[in-house]
């Protein structure tokens, strides 16, 4: 959980990335691949709830997103 929070912070502090690019970069960083269109759309919907002024809430939601990727089967197994 701590690493997911650090990863979220790292991507959120990158000023050159918008949320769509962040989703792609998080997938590449955590899973070593690009998200499918469906995955990117679902992530966008989930992360939209974090479009608040509160930086802490935004980090929390992005950390949950990273945690979900780490918990996925794609993270644990290689093809």
Image: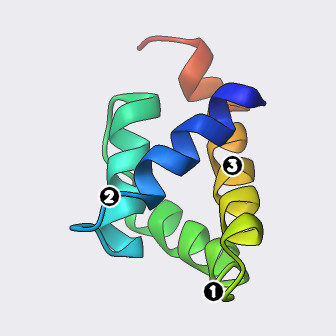
Q: How far apart, in angstroms, are the residues tagged by discs 2 and 3? A: 15 Å
Q: Position of residue 45 (x, y in %)?
A: 63, 80
Identify the element where label 3 is drawn.
helix
Q: Is residue 62 visible?
A: yes
* Residue 51, disc: 1
The quadrant in which the C terminus is found is top left
**Crowd around label 3: few <14 · some 14–19 · many ≥20 (10 Å):** many
Upstream in sequence: badge 2 or badge 3:
2
In this figure, which residue is indicated by the disc labeled 3? 63
**Crowd around label 1: few <14 · some 14–19 · many ≥20 (10 Å):** few
Upstream in sequence: badge 1 or badge 2:
2
Identify which residue is drawn at 62% across, 43% down.
Answer: 66
Q: How far apart, in angstroms, are the residues tagged by discs 1 and 2? A: 16 Å
Identify which residue is drawn at 33% across, 39% down.
Answer: 28
Name, please, the residue furthest toward the left. Answer: 16
Q: Position of residue 65 (x, y in %)?
A: 66, 52
In this figure, which residue is indicated by the disc labeled 2? 14
């Amino acid at each position: 959980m701590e690493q997911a929070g650090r990863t979220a912070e790292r991507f959120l502090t990158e000023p050159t990335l918008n949320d769509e690019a962040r989703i792609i970069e998080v997938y590449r960083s955590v899973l070593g691949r690009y998200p499918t269109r469906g995955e990117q759309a679902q992530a966008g919907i989930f992360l939209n709830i974090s479009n608040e002024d509160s930086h802490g809430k935004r980090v929390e939601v992005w950390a949950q997103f990273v945690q979900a990727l780490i918990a996925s089967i794609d993270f644990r197994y290689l093809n």
